[in-house]
Amino acid sequence: MIARIWRGVVAKADANAYAEYMLETGVRGYSTTPGNRNVYMLRRTVGEECEFLMVSLWNSIDDIRAFAGDDVEQAVFYPEDDRFLVDRDNRVRHYEVVESEGGIT
């Protein structure tokens, strides 16, 4: 299993609207792609900004490729992202999941 991790930052005032937007776009995009096992949208407020961390779990790099395209480390963006994001990672990070729920994957 592979974890795909992306980070973006919005103004604190936009945090709830961005979370709703991400449910409609990013989370839906991840979860409807075959090979996706789960999606976590994490957020934390730091001062006047809110940082989002998207963690998606995948069966294989080929499944990620079906979602993200040939350059699997390129972040996937949606039409209204520029309206919300004040900072973002343009590249994602992938990690092999070594253990999950007490067992080796």
Image (tube, rainbow, N blue to C red):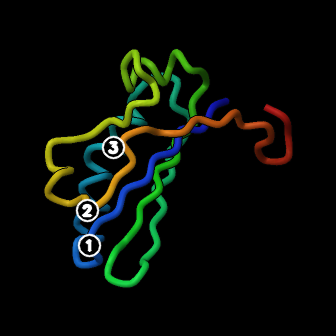
Q: Are marks 2 and 1 in contact (CB under 8 Å)?
A: yes
Q: Quadrant of the N terminus?
A: top right
Please tell me whether mark 2 sits on a helix, a strand or a loop: strand
Q: Residue 26 shows which numbered tag?
A: 3
Residue in front for this viewpoint, 78 or 90: 90
Residue in the picture at 27% in, 40% down? 77
What residue type is disc 3 on? Gly
Residue in the picture at 70% in, 33% down? 96
- Where is mark 1, residue-wise? 11
Please tell me whether mark 3 sits on a helix, a strand or a loop: helix
What residue type is disc 2 on? Val
What residue type is disc 1 on? Ala
Residue in the picture at 60% in, 21% down? 60
The residue mark sitting in front, 2 or 1, is 2
Residue in the picture at 38% in, 84% down? 47
Disc 2 to disc 1, C-alpha distance: 7 Å
